[in-house]
Amino acid sequence: MKILVINGPNLNMLGRRQVTIYGPQTLEDIGNLLQKRAGELGVEVTFYQSNSEGDIIDFIQREAPSAQGIIINPGALTHYSFSLRDALATFDLPVIEVHLSNIYAREEWRARSVIAPAVKGQISGLGWRGYMAALDVLAAELAPETGR
């Protein structure tokens, strides 16, 4: 099973950018933790980050047909990228939107996600652990029935 993990603008600056809000972990740290957990779950993850909306959409269009799920932290694209929302809605895949900080407890403009209507669920405010929770949920949901 293959899950895409997509990160939007400025997430490449994690660990240096507003550490009190986003935490000290770098995006590489998060990627390494996800790779380790994916190995434990028997899941393949493809990790991607871009500061360009078009590049993210191209990645989704290219990779989604061979994936079974998507975890996405759209960064600021969360609040205005209808084209990203449409790209996610194009494919019949479960998508979980992740935010390191609680977007509902911050500036008013951050509390609206145009991505949310195209996703199965959203995890907000759990820091790097939100990615892990999203991976666990998708892996469990996509796993063949085990009779449990």
Image (spheres, grey):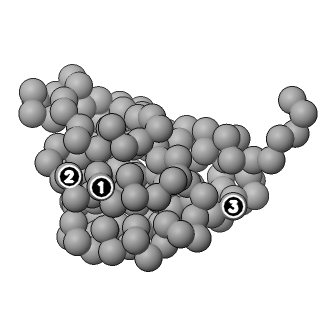
Which dot marks residue 1?
3
Q: Answer few, some or many: residues within 10 Å of disc 1's Cα (few below 14, many 20 plus, some between 14 and 19).
A: some
Which residue, given by chain and number where applicable, does mark 2 sit on?
82
What residue is rendered at 41% in x and 35% in y? Answer: 122
Q: Answer few, some or many: residues within 10 Å of disc 3's Cα (few below 14, many 20 plus, some between 14 and 19).
A: some
Q: Amino acid at mark 1?
A: Asp
Q: Depth check: 146 or 29 in front?
A: 146
Where is residue 54, by image quadrant?
bottom left
- Discs 1, 2 touching: Cβ within 8 Å: yes
Count of labels in the image = 3
Residue 148 in view in this figure: yes
Pick whichever of labels 3 and 2 is earlier in the sequence.
3
Q: Secondary structure at mark 3?
A: loop
Residue 136 x %, y %? 63, 42
Q: Nearer the viewer, mark 3 or mark 1?
A: 1
Residue 23 x %, y %? 33, 43
Q: Secondary structure at mark 2?
A: helix
Q: Depth check: 87 or 98 in front?
A: 87
Q: Amino acid at mark 2?
A: Phe
Q: CA distance from mark 3 to mark 2?
A: 28 Å
60 relative to 26, above or below: below
Residue 20 x %, y %? 24, 37
Q: Answer few, some or many: residues within 10 Å of disc 2's Cα (few below 14, many 20 plus, some between 14 and 19).
A: some
The C terminus lies in quadrant: top right
Which dot marks residue 86?
1
